[in-house]
Amino acid sequence: CRSAHASAQWREAADNAFALLSDYIAELNGDDTLHRALVTVTAGPCFGEMSEEEQRVAMLLQHEFERDGIHLPAEERKKVREVIGHITALEGMFNQNITVGSRKFFDVDAHRVEAVIPRNVLVDHVPQSEESSRFGSAKITVSTENHIANSLLKYSADPVLRKEIYMEVNTACPQNLDVLDGLVAQRHKLATMLGFSSYAERFLQDKMAKNPENVSRFLTQMGEGCERQYKADMELLSLAKKQVEGADAGRIEAWDVPFYTGALKAKSNGEGGDANEIGGYFTVDSCLDGMKILVRDLFGIQMTEQDLTAEERWDGPDSQPIRKFQLSHEEEGSLGILYMDLHPREGKYAHAAHFTVRCGCQMRNSSEYQQPIVALVCNLSPAYANVGSTCLLSHSECETLYHELGHALHSLLSRTVFQHLSGTRAAMDFIETPSHLFESYVWDPTFLNFIGKHYSTGEHISEQAVSSLIASRNAFRALEVQTQIVYSRFDQEIFGPRAGQASTTDVFARLHKEHAVPYAPGTHWHSRFGHLVTYGSGYYGYLYSQVFAADIWTKCFSANPLSSTEGKKLWKGLLRHGGAKDPNTMLSTVLGREPSVDSFFQSIS
């Protein structure tokens, strides 16, 4: 409700309820009676006789107590709870500003936009200003919404328009700069009150990486591994810009990157990466059909669409409807419910995410299992009038959808005793592994043949287009990795020991300069970086998990992507356990050896 309900009153009420619940949890985490009772178990003679899952949940709960200051005097614990309350409020404010405060409308020259998006399409989906609504107006109103801004940045050959769009998008949420300053200060205050040198040190204590020093070493390894290819990528972009805009075109700017990477991919791969070649072949329905094939062949699971009751809906009457699916297995029975809220609407969370509505767990004093309920919330392209009710997707939107499916399957196929360890409630630098793994399916030629069907003719996407699309995957991957390194370093630094010593915008700009990644002065992309709330000090986990996912795909699925043998191993060896097992053990079980970075670096070379 906080992120997706159509009613602003519901969203506000849900925010207030979440704040109350967070205060209550903070109060419980400061209850020394509960802590003493738990320690009698973890330090007692029976602890060694408990199952691995029981031991893990007990130690995780104990660490949560101690991480929130249970060792402090009562008065100090009260102050800790107050700081945690401030942090929760700031986190909610940051996300709320992204959801409702970063959608901007502005007028641009119509002829610049209409070369990419027809006027009638924009008018149907973006409220026009008084000036742009006048008959014969040379202006048209556009918005900072992802599906519009990203299309213009990727496909417009006009550098003036690209710059204008980029600057508007990346200055759309200035109010979050002060909120982020407050969040940085309060998180650092909390960490030092609890005896840590930084919030990052506190956060990483129970993660796979363990501490900021290991994260820094990992990011250095990633940077060194892609450095040569990154420099080559940037040289290619610079050459392309000079060829298009002239020898004095200047350096590659931040607003140039989407356009020139897309153009070079299209050129080098016989137009296979171009929207004209693959446009119309990917739809929401074809992607859903592909999901049904995927879970059936890998896991023997049936994915069946069901009708929603009025009480289940959180979308508005005029929006594209939420869809509901039940997953079931012949031997396991019903596995859980998956909701899909796939298209944008006013007031909705502006990115893509997996939300757990209800965790799975073993019911107390019963053989019954509480089945998980999850929701995928995305902002995919809506249906346009010229294609009826069909929702056409770009290939990148397919990738997003399957990424979120990986999270959903992690939750739905988990069968832990405790909901505290259910599904994605595992180490944060591990939980992106399934989502990155399932992204790989939209790059596999066999699977692309399932989901690549033209919306009007039913014709399958051509082998040439598939080959070209796949060849384009790793083009400029080093640039993407270098950018992720910058974001990860930024996340580590603002929540590190020197928190608050420089403005977040100055830190963001400096890191771009140090890593030679294009940056536009005056912008503040990080003011819309929602992962600073959900993944604060943990954003490196995206790259961390990509390494694991690349290794699993290469070792287990690249030769036979729909292997039921490997699918069963993935389910029973990893997905089923959620956070109930050590991630290193689960990875070794699936791989049959220790994880390696080789597959990842091979993929970007």
Image (tube, rainbow, N blue to C red):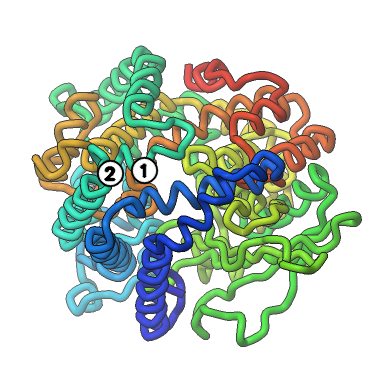
Instruction: Count the marks.
Output: 2
What residue did someone put label 2 on?
199
Find residue 216 and report its image quarter: top left
Which residue does the image show at 71% across and 46% down from the upper left?
Answer: 576
Which residue does the image show at 71% across and 42% down from the upper left?
Answer: 49
Asked which secondary structure carries label 1, the reply is helix
Q: Is residue 166 visible?
A: no
Which residue does the image show at 76% across and 64% down from the upper left?
Answer: 369
Q: Is residue 329 visible?
A: yes
- Tell which of 440 and 488 is nearer to you: 488
Q: Amino acid at mark 2?
A: Tyr
Which residue does the image show at 50% across and 52% down from the upper left?
Answer: 61
Q: Are discs 2 and 1 less than 8 Å apart at CB?
A: yes
- Tell which of 211 and 364 is nearer to you: 364
| Residue 551 rendering spot, x and y as whole percentages | 61, 25
Q: Amino acid at mark 1?
A: Phe
Mark 2 crowd level (few <14, some 14–19, many ≥20, 10 Å Cα)? many
Asked which secondary structure carries label 2, the reply is helix
| Residue 200 rendering spot, x and y as whole percentages | 30, 40
The image shows residue 131, relative to residue 107, as above or below, that is below
What residue did someone put label 1 on?
203
